[in-house]
Amino acid sequence: MKNIFLIIPVALIIGLQASCNSDGGKEESSPAKEEAHAHDHRNENTATFTDAQIKSVGIETGNIEEKQLTASIRANGALRVPNQNKASVNSLYSGVIRTLLVQPGNVVKRGEVIATISNPDFIRMQEEYLSIGPKIVLAEQEFNRQKELNEGNAGALKNLQAAESEMRALNTRRSSLEQQLQLMGINPRSLTNGKLTTVVSLRTPIGGIVSNVPVKMGSYVDVSTTVAEVVDNSQLHLDLFVYEKDLPKLKNNQSIHFTVTNNPGKEYDAQIFSLGSTFEDESKAVSVHAQVKGDKTGLIDGMNITALISLDKITTPAVPNDAIVTWQGQDYIFIVTDAHAEEEHHEEGKDHKHDESEPHDHKVPAKPAGKEVTFEKVPVAKGTSEVGYTQITLLKPVAPDTKIVTKGAFFVLAKLTNSGEGEHSH
């Protein structure tokens, strides 16, 4: 009986051990471990977006560009138009505005009529000019008569002198009236009886853009009243302020790239033509003048600007500021790559090979429909950052024509980090 009781416990222990070993084998092949095994092979530096997702978050791609961002001086200043390219249109004679032919923003040519003024004095001046002609004829006749009498000793010398004085005074008055009429824009020789000009035309002395029209219809104006202001932006230039220590680095004909404060996304070009020789006010800054080159669209006198003065012709790889993201203290850009897709294809091949030893009813999850784009995170070192671009040094080799994310890199990083955190939490 004792031998029987010893055999039963030993058999129970062997059975429990076999059961434990069997449960352990099933646990190794559980879905959780398979998921962990697949996670070990996932590329944690890539994120995949569908076309719909890319369009939704506004991701844009481009190339690494070459920009003049190194060896340059940053300076602030303003756009200026020389005074000889500005005009205040005034009337030399007082009167009332009869017509206004321009408004702010209009483009005008030199000599174009911008307004007309009326005044009864204009008619009286023309009347006097027309009536002085016959008086001069009579004065010349009297002078000739007195001259003949004086030559025959039949006339007094003082009468001859008086006739000559009257004739000269009338000629002087006629010349004065002619000049005044010409200043009014009236051709004296075109005047005939009954065809007098009732209004005076105001013409712009320069061509350009009308910047201001401070008067209105019926306004009374005189020589001190500005009827309109015209600005010619063709000679637009920069007034920059450079510190004394940087002045020896500058010279005429150096290139400048600048942006307007209210539109930092667009870059303009200029060229230095003059260096100041005195300090501005009480500061240690010296004025530097540069001529704006190329397109001047959107530039207005008085705009504040930020400029980069190029000290050499060396260019450097650069990307838009929005293309760079920072994660855990490291700066990155995202490149367009098929590495993630290839890895998924490789993993599917491995799974298919593994399925040969498993039941045939095992199915691989279907891939989502639609075109996908994979972005890979590439570490970079940042350099100079100006005019919307930042100099970069790639810390990983990248093909020259590789496309990069130029806008929306933040969304790519967000998806990459969120997906990574989600898998680590499983």
Image (cartoon, rainbow, N blue to C red):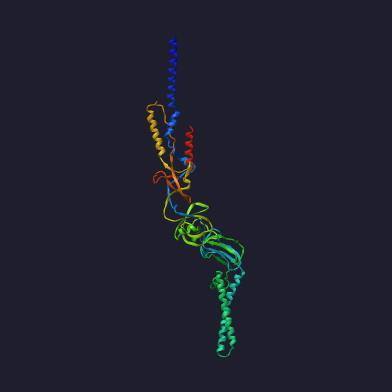
- Depth order, front residue of 290/401: 290
In this view, 272 is above or below 138? above
Query: Quarter-wise, where is residue 219 in the image?
Result: bottom right
Residue farthest to the top, as pictured = 1
In this picture, residue 232 sits left or right of residue 357: right
Q: Is residue 59 above or below residue 123?
A: above
Residue 173 point in image, percent of width and height: 58, 76
The reply to whether residue 366 is in sight is: no
Position of residue 113 relative to residue 333, above or below, is below
**271 horizontally vs 89: left or right:** left
Q: How many marks?
A: 0
Lateral position of residue 337 relative to residue 80, left or right: left
Residue pushed farthest front? 2
| Residue found at x 54% / y 62% | 230
- State whether residue 348 is above or below residue 109: above
Residue sitting nearer the eye, 373 or 103 = 373
Give whichever of 400, 25 is nearer the camera: 25
Quarter where residue 161 is shown? bottom right
Residue at image point 48% right, 47% down: 321
Residue 101 falls in which quadrant of the image? bottom right
Give the x, y percent position of residue 391. Answer: 45, 49
Q: Residue at x 44, y 12 (%)?
A: 6
Horizontal and vertical percent position of residue 389: 46, 49
Task: Answer yes or no: is residue 229 visible.
Answer: yes
Q: Is 190 in front, or is 152?
A: 152
